[in-house]
Amino acid sequence: MKKTLMIGFAASVLTACGVESVDEESSESNGQNQRDTNDTDDIETGENVIADSLNSPWAMQMHQDEWFITDRDGNLLMVQDGEVIDQTLNLSEEIVQQGESGLLGFVLHPDFESNQQAFLYHSYQDSEGIKNRVIQVVRNEDVWEEEAELLGNIPGAPTHNGGRLAVFEDELYVTTGDAEDPSLSQDVDSLAGKILKMTFDGSIPSAMPMEDSYVWSYGHRNPQGLAWLEDGTMYSSEHGQTALDEVNQIEPGNNYGWPDYEGDETSDDTKAPFIHSGDDTWAPSGLVATGDQLYMAGLRGEAVYEVNVDGGEISSFIEGYGRIRDVLVQDNQLYFLTNNTDGRGNPDDTDDKLIEVELN
């Protein structure tokens, strides 16, 4: 059965650890008003609510008429014909949920139809504290069994765990946060503050920028989105420390500067962001590409953002639903997960939701 360990998350603990109790994902004190659940002026017309009453959802995947959704408390859910069905997770390590840790990334194997395999990213605890790991699971009806740990011992913490999984050209990519220790992002021997790349069996691919290393890029603070344009150009969304959130164009072996450089500051050895939020705050999470556009989930920004990569411009595309955790595009439909029930939003009676909106 699924094993989940809940750990108390008090502001005093975070302060003792040298971390602000209100982190970059908070909707408080950000210069913006919290959502008024009775104000629908900004709500998109023609939206379709596929599922509601979700609790702190994090990642979603679609297969035919089935939706699979992880939530931070350690639940894997299937949505079919409007019904939310709990899935059983049989894992070798307990899922630890503390602050922003928990059950995070989820992506289906490209051959899911035939092999019923998927990949999960979740937090656990060992003698040294919170860690994260990437595992392979297989579905048998409503039961998902762990088949293999692909990579463990990824540094973790109550905040800054990264957690996004994505597949591109039959390889698995993983985002990791700095685990509240910024120096780890510049340490190429550490798995923290990185974008990692591996084969589906957990091996290091043959063509990597660093020998015998999973590290695809480094110098990241808390990246939570990955996407590729049709030409293979790779992008990632990343939380800044105080504003200065980023969309980065990712190239193998590049150093994206954290904690030494933010915003337009850079050096000969670091790469500046493709675009950043300046004094505003997006608190970006999921990212998806379609055509020459990127769509990005904004938590603290409370919007789905549209990024025009040709013009290097970003604008709010959908507002009025509160915090947004993840986005997906398929067949000219945009899907997004709200994230108002994580203790930092202003939920209505039916939050959180998976919502479908037609793209023009």
Image (cartoon, rainbow, N blue to C red):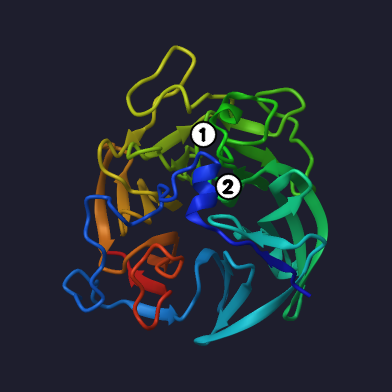
- Residue in front for this viewpoint, 328 or 1: 1
Q: Amino acid under label 1? A: His
Sort mark 1 into few (<14), some (14-19) or many (20+) by Cα contacts within 10 Å.
many
Where disc 2 sits, the SS reads: loop
Q: Which residue is mark 2?
A: 161
Q: Quadrant of residue 85?
A: bottom right
x, y percentage for residue 229? Answer: 45, 44
Judged left or right of residue 296, residue 11 is right
* Residue 288 visible (yes or no): no
Q: Quadrant of residue 76?
A: bottom right
x, y percentage for residue 197? Answer: 66, 39
Q: Quadrant of the N terminus?
A: bottom right
Q: Residue at x 59, y 55 (%)?
A: 101
* Residue 84 visible (yes or no): yes
Where disc 1 sits, the SS reads: loop
- Residue in front for this viewpoint, 125 or 281: 125
Sort mark 2 into few (<14), some (14-19) or many (20+) by Cα contacts within 10 Å.
many
Above/below status of 247 relative to 341: above
Q: Residue at x 27, y 62 (%)?
A: 318
Q: Which residue is mark 1?
A: 220
Label 1 or label 2, whichever comes before in sequence order = 2
Judged left or right of residue 86, residue 53 is left
Above/below status of 349 relative to 275: below
Q: How far is mark 1 from mark 2, CA to CA?
A: 11 Å
Q: Quadrant of the C terminus?
A: bottom left
Q: Which mark is residue 42?
A: none
- Residue in front for this viewpoint, 141 or 64: 141
